[in-house]
């Protein structure tokens, strides 16, 4: 071992007890000079923060610098901080250079290019780590740890259950004292995004807006584990409202920040050639249509027709299910009943990281009387590890799959759109699935200026794939005059 390597090893072994002299203002080391509006946003931060800001404002840079400053000020041993993006590659491309450049200016700090982590000295003689993560797969490293602070960048394009099922429990360490008597934001979170339709990020942002104004928010009680629900401040009894004082709200379109010149905005709008795209990216509009959206138009039409409403389960009718089976990602299930030609969509369920026995238990606990269970064709594929197909495992659990023949994605989407015309959705129990379907889209190729042939595979795909299974299952059942669907009378 060389002398340099030996000294480095010794420093790493002893550094937790070494108090590194740091300047009162760490920005004298990092060189961070925020614009006035960035500094105001930083000053207004509370424990939880919703930032909807236009492209090229510098929100990601501000967030990374905030992570560095808060890590250095962490009063606890072994501080843990995280930056997340929809994919690991996006996290690296957006934030790693910013984080690495700041770290390299701070004495007695380290970084790992492989893991995309930095380790910093704190003002109290401890160490704090900042790590980058992608949230596009359930097999990521976020589960099972604690956090002192986290930035969720491009939040509108991350799965909502990253917050509800993974991150939020990490911010509840009794030894970290979430918000102390002085209002310090220990165990904090910042959600950064530009809009991507009215999804979970929109719901969270509207809640933050009301709470930041001291207003109450109506929270739905039956929207599943992963969707945050709608908000309203009109016509509600005061006893129904929830009041919070630990959220901040920032909403800054390009026309109000002055960061980009008016001439540049005019040129960008002309070059983009798409008002919705410009309104979404620069003016932070949640109303703008999502480019390439596959089911959004049909779902909007259903809402306009009053077809998204309260739909009661009818115990006189069988419940049919349609599935998308995940291997390394989520499994999704739609629950429907048929009344004549009308499809009543009464429920939706999605989860990940568990065996098929979990989903069999879910079916039993819901207490429905079941008809057919529609599964994609690959349910019959024999797995090398067990020598059994998943269909065989399901049959052993009391679930008898009906296999839907293989079809192209295009045919499945066409059938899914046609099926939506016949549907009525329960507004609460299906909200999670509809929110995902609304954002399911073809990806736009900037190089060719065309949409790709295959839809983008991300956290929105599972509900849409299960919907295609349902549509194709019903299509193949329809020609059979003895099929349950065709024999049910409208009176039932």
Image (cartoon, rainbow, N blue to C red):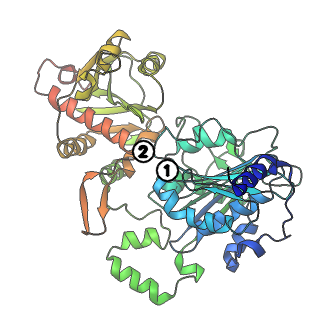
* Closest to the observer, 302 or 321: 321
* Closest to the observer, 17 or 441: 17
Residue on which the image places disc 1: 158
Residue 317, image quadrant: top left
Question: Contact (CB < 8 A) between labels 1 and 2?
Answer: yes
* Extreme residue in the bottom direction: 263
Lateral position of residue 70 relative to residue 219, left or right: right
Residue 106, image quadrant: bottom right
* Closest to the observer, 458 or 336: 458
SS for callout 2: loop
Q: Looking at the figure, which quarter contains the C terminus?
A: top left
Residue 102: image location, x then y, percent: 67, 67
* Extreme residue in the right direction: 181
The residue located at (72%, 67%) in the rendering is 42
Residue 56: image location, x then y, percent: 52, 74
Residue 117, compared with residue 357, is above or below; it is below
Residue 220 seen in the figure: no
Disc number at residue 426? none
Residue 194: image location, x then y, percent: 50, 64
The residue located at (56%, 74%) in the rendering is 57
Q: CA distance from mark 1 to mark 2?
A: 7 Å
Residue on which the image places disc 2: 459
Lateral position of residue 492 relative to residue 69, left or right: left
Residue 133 seen in the figure: yes
């Amino acid at each position: 071992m060389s002398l340099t390597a030996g000294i480095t090893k010794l420093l790493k072994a002893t550094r937790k007890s070494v108090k590194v002299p740091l300047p009162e203002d760490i920005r004298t080391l990092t060189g961070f000079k925020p614009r006035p509006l960035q500094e105001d946003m930083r000053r207004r931060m509370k424990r939880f923060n919703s930032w909807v800001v236009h492209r090229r404002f510098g929100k990601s840079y501000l967030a990374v610098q905030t992570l560095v400053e808060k890590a250095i000020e962490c009063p606890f041993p072994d501080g843990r901080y995280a930056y997340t993006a929809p994919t690991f590659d996006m996290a690296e491309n957006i934030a790693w250079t910013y984080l690495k450049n700041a770290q390299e200016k701070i004495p007695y700090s380290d970084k790992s290019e492989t893991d995309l982590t930095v380790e910093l000295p704190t003002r109290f003689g401890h160490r704090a780590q900042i790590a980058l993560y992608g949230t596009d797969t359930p097999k990521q490293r976020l589960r099972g740890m604690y956090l002192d602070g986290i930035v969720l960048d491009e939040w509108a394009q991350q799965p909502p259950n990253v917050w509800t099922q993974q991150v939020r429990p990490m911010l509840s360490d009794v030894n970290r004292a979430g918000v102390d008597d002085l209002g310090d934001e220990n165990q904090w979170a910042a959600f950064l995004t530009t809009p991507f339709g009215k999804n979970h990020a929109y719901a969270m942002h509207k809640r933050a807006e009301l709470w930041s104004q001291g207003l109450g928010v109506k929270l739905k009680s039956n929207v599943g584990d992963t969707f945050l629900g709608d908000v309203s401040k009109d016509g509600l009894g005061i006893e129904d409202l929830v009041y919070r004082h630990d959220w901040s709200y920032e909403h800054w379109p390009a026309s109000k920040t002055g960061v980009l010149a008016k001439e540049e905005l005019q040129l960008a709008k002309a070059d983009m050639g798409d008002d919705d795209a410009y309104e979404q990216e620069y003016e932070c509009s949640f109303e703008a249509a999502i480019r390439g959206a596959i089911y959004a138009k049909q779902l909007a039409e259903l809402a306009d027709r009053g077809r998204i409403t309260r739909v009661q389960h009818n115990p006189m009718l069988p419940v049919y299910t349609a599935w998308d089976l995940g291997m390394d990602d989520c499994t999704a299930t739609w629950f429907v009943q048929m009344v004549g030609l009308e499809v009543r969509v009464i429920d939706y369920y999605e989860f990940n990281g568990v065996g098929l026995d979990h989903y069999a238990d879910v079916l039993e606990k819901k207490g429905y009387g079941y008809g057919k269970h529609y599964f994609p064709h690959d349910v019959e594929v024999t797995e090398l590890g067990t020598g059994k197909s998943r269909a065989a495992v399901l049959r052993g659990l009391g679930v008898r799959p009906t296999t839907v023949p293989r079809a192209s994605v295009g045919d499945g989407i066409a059938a899914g759109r046609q099926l939506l015309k016949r549907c009525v959705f329960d507004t609460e129990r299906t909200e999670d699935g509809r929110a995902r379907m609304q954002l399911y889209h073809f990806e736009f190729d900037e190089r060719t200026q065309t949409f790709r042939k295959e839809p983008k595979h991300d956290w929105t795909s599972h509900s849409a794939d299960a919907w295609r299974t349902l549509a194709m299952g019903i299509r193949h059942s329809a020609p059979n005059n003895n099929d349950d669907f065709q024999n049910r009378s409208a009176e039932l």
